[in-house]
Image (cartoon, rainbow, N blue to C red):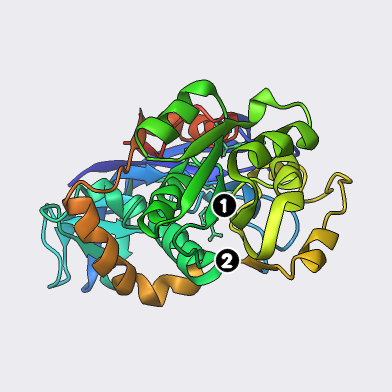
Amino acid sequence: MAITQQQWIYAQRPQGTVGPSHYQLHTQPLDTSLAPGEVLIAARYFSVDPYMRIGQSAKATYDPQPHPLGVVQQGGVVAQVLASKASAFASGDWVHCYTGWQTHARVAAAELTLLDSTVAPVTTALGVLGMPGRTAWFGLTEAGRPHAGEVVVVSGAAGAVGSLVLQFAKRHGARVLGIAGGAAKCAWLRDTLGADWAIDYRDHADPDSMGAAIKALTGGVDVYFDNVGGMVTDAVLPLINRRARIVICGQISQYSGGLDTPPPGPRLLHHMLYQRATMQGILARDYVHRMDEMTRIVAPWVRAGEIVFEESIIDGFDQLPSALNALFTGEHRGKLLVKA
Ligand SMILES: NC(=O)c1ccc[n+]([C@@H]2O[C@H](COP(=O)([O-])OP(=O)(O)OC[C@H]3O[C@@H](n4cnc5c(N)ncnc54)[C@H](OP(=O)(O)O)[C@@H]3O)[C@@H](O)[C@H]2O)c1
């Protein structure tokens, strides 16, 4: 079978915003002869995630080394099997893998997870039943530990992780404030996801103004699930209640340059002292071995239509670098994917 493979090669470290100029498109014929145990896949959906921008920082992050230059952009993929020399996979099967931003690849069978498209749409393997779902579930239940009646504040609440945290917190009986950019997203948080309150952070020029709005709605914060950092966090921290739990999931407002040279900011940790609060960073990969546990709980909610898992799908492999940039301009709701 003759196949032309396309690959987005990560070519240059961005100083600020990432975009197409930091990638090169390579097009070449792919040798499709398979060794025993190998599978030939065609990527159908690509995950576009903020961690990709973290890995582009020149410094060590949760990975000891930054994403290397000159190789395919790493990332999660939902693909279909085109040919197989592994007994567990047959042509036409849907799989999840980490082959990154390339249209086709030869992969060892051990690196593939078989997907059952009758259980849930295959794209959910990159969203609610994949890494973002795992992050939201374990971040909230292990670090946030919300109780019924408590106030949970979620930043980045209209995104892949945040939209799930919001709904999981509601299922725990919490009262939930979602913070997101724009009136339309805030209406979606309230009307579709069931948030008790929503705040558009772009309506506020400084943390004091946003903090006053959060206090007026909630009275105080028991759990803060933070996806964005920066000014939003500066607004929330002075409002924490006694023994509040602060979950540091992401700091996307800092990724485009602020990781290497953090801007000076308010020093607010005295509120942690006053309120005997805890702050915990959480990482999805620490819970990979508990994926089945999360799936057992969340998949039935997905099948029953009790969880909203919106997917924003951009068409075209050529759009991948621009799509990564779009995470920072906030044009999508829910999980951002690119369709091959
Ligand atoms: N710890 C982990 O293991 C783990 C795993 C997955 C994700 N994360 C983190 O969780 C966060 C959300 O990830 P995701 O995949 O769910 O992405 P996402 O929320 O679907 O997309 C990113 C969103 O961030 C918001 N944003 C961008 N720049 C911002 C800024 N300067 N200030 C405030 N909001 C900003 C935008 O929404 P608005 O329109 O609302 O601005 C954008 O839609 C990220 O920080 C990511 O790094 C962590």
Q: Residues within 10 Å of mark 2 (few under 14, many from 20)?
A: some
Q: Residues within 10 Å of mark 1 (few under 14, many from 20)?
A: few
Looking at the picture, does residue 27 appear above or below residue 84?
Answer: above
- Could you say whether the residue bearing mark 1 is in a helix, strand or loop? helix
Question: Residue beneath label 2, please?
Answer: 282
Name the foreground residue: 184 vs 311. 184
Judged left or right of residue 81, residue 191 is right
Name the foreground residue: 143 vs 45. 143
Quadrant of the displayed image that contains ligand 1: top right
Q: Which of the two marks, 1 or 2, is nearer to us in this view?
A: 2
Displayed quadrant of residue 246: bottom right
Question: Residue beneath label 1, please?
Answer: 51
Q: Could one spot residue 63 in this view of the protein? A: no
Looking at the picture, does residue 113 appear above or below residue 48?
Answer: below
- Could you say whether the residue bearing mark 2 is in a helix, strand or loop? loop
Spot occupied by residue 114 in the image (x, y as percentages of width and height): 21, 63
Q: Earlier in the sequence, mark 1 or mark 2?
A: 1
State the residue at coordinates (65%, 26%).
202
Looking at the picture, does residue 203 appear above or below residue 274?
Answer: above
Judged left or right of residue 251, residue 323 is left
State the residue at coordinates (64%, 31%).
201
Q: Could one spot residue 133 in this view of the protein? A: yes
Spot occupied by residue 68 in the image (x, y as percentages of width and height): 62, 56
Spot occupied by residue 161 in the image (x, y as percentages of width and height): 46, 50
Ligand 1 within 8 Å of the CB at mark 2: yes
State the residue at coordinates (26%, 50%).
79
What amino acid is found at the position of numbered circle 1 in the picture?
Answer: Tyr
Ligand 1 within 8 Å of the CB at mark 1: yes
Q: Work out which quarter of the rendered image holds the C terminus and state it.
A: top left
For residue 249, the mark is none
How far is the residue under mark 1 from the one under mark 2?
Answer: 13 Å
State the residue at coordinates (75%, 65%).
275
